[in-house]
Structure formats: structure tokens, C-alpha cells
Image (cartoon, rainbow, N blue to C red):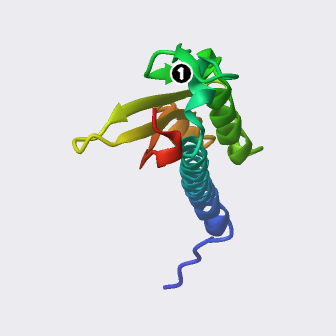
Amino acid sequence: MRTNKVTAGQSLVEFALVFPLFILLMMGLFDIGRAVFYLSTLNTAVREGTRLAIVQPDCDYLSDPGNCEGGYLETYPLNCASAISTANIKICNEINNKFFTVGNLSTSAITINHTVSSTGDPEINIGIDYLFRPITPGIALMGDLTMHVNSHMLMAPIAEP
């Protein structure tokens, strides 16, 4: 008894079933890599912005920076979109420059906050909430992912209010 099985199209059918799953997996891996890269770049940008903030002269935060008189120009916590003092504008520009062409921070919330530590030392806290948009169809269906990055440093004695 001889059986003739025709298997000419079996490989094509298996390929057609497995290939979309393989492509989806590869796109997902690239998307995860993109997300890690964005998170790393955000960390660098917020850390560099905080480094600049801790050495800003106190006069740059005041309403009259020429003679270091008067009160603070802004109330804290403050969003970069509403920054008007020289120091806060420099900080926001530094963060945007360090994020460079990787993404767009115009829709992100960059928050600057001046606080006092438990030991009485002035400190600055800068945070970014960035909306990451995945490109992989399966991940994109879940919606955008919010990345929150925060940096916290003590202010230098020259910049103490």
C-alpha cells in the first residue's frame, strides 16, 4: 500500500502563519528598545537641568535680577510653560537641549520645585512626565505610556535663597 501525500504547500502555509507573529515580536522588541532609549535620554536631560539649577544665582529667580531685591518671580511648583524668571528659562532650555531631537517635550510637563530638606538645606526637584507613543500595533492598542523622570539635588551655597 502506497500513500502519496502532497506537501508542496505545507511550508508556505506554516510561513504565512508564523511570519506575522515574528514581525510583531520584532517590532515589539524595537519599540521596547526605543522606550528604554527615551527613558535614558530623559534621565540625562532632567539630571543636566538639575545640575544647572543648583548653581543658578538666587538673583536670577527674583523679580529684579539686576540688584537682587524683591521676591521670587514665580511660585513653586512651576511648569516650564509658565516660566518667566531668567533662571527657570535657562533650566527649561537646558532640559530641552539635552533631549535634543529624540522627542518633543512641548507636550510634556516639566515641573520645577524648590523645597527645604529636613536639615534646613535648600533643594531643587525637577520632574518630567513624558508621553511615549509606541508604534507596535499590539502595544499601541493599550495606549500611550507615561514616563516619569525625577531628579533631586541640594542647592549650592552660592545659589541659596
- Left or right: 139 in relation to 115: right
**What is the crowding at mark 1: few (fewer than 14 residues within 10 Å), some, or many (at least 20)?**
some
Name the residue at 68% across, 45% down: 99
Quarter holding residue 85: top right
The amino acid on which the numbered mark 1 sits, given as a three-letter code, is Asn
Is 36 above or below relative to 113?
below
Name the residue at 63% across, 31% down: 87
Looking at the image, the residue that sits furthest to the left is: 118
- Left or right: 58 in relation to 65: left
User: Can you give x and y, in whole percent of width and height, for residue 62 in the image?
Assistant: 58, 20
Residue holding disc 1: 79
User: Can you give x and y, in whole percent of width and height, for residue 97 in the image?
Assistant: 74, 42
User: Can you give x and y, in whole percent of width and height, for residue 129 in the image?
Assistant: 49, 32
Closer to the camera in the image, 61 or 83: 61
Looking at the image, the residue that sits furthest to the right is: 101
Is 157 above or below relative to 129?
below
Q: Is residue 130 visible?
A: yes
Q: Count the marks: how many?
A: 1
User: Can you give x and y, in whole percent of width and height, for residue 45 in the image?
Assistant: 61, 47
Closer to the camera in the image, 34 or 74: 74
Name the residue at 47% across, 47% down: 157
Closer to the camera in the image, 24 or 6: 24
Q: The residue tagged with tag 1: helix, strand or loop?
A: strand
Looking at the image, the residue that sits furthest to the bottom is: 1
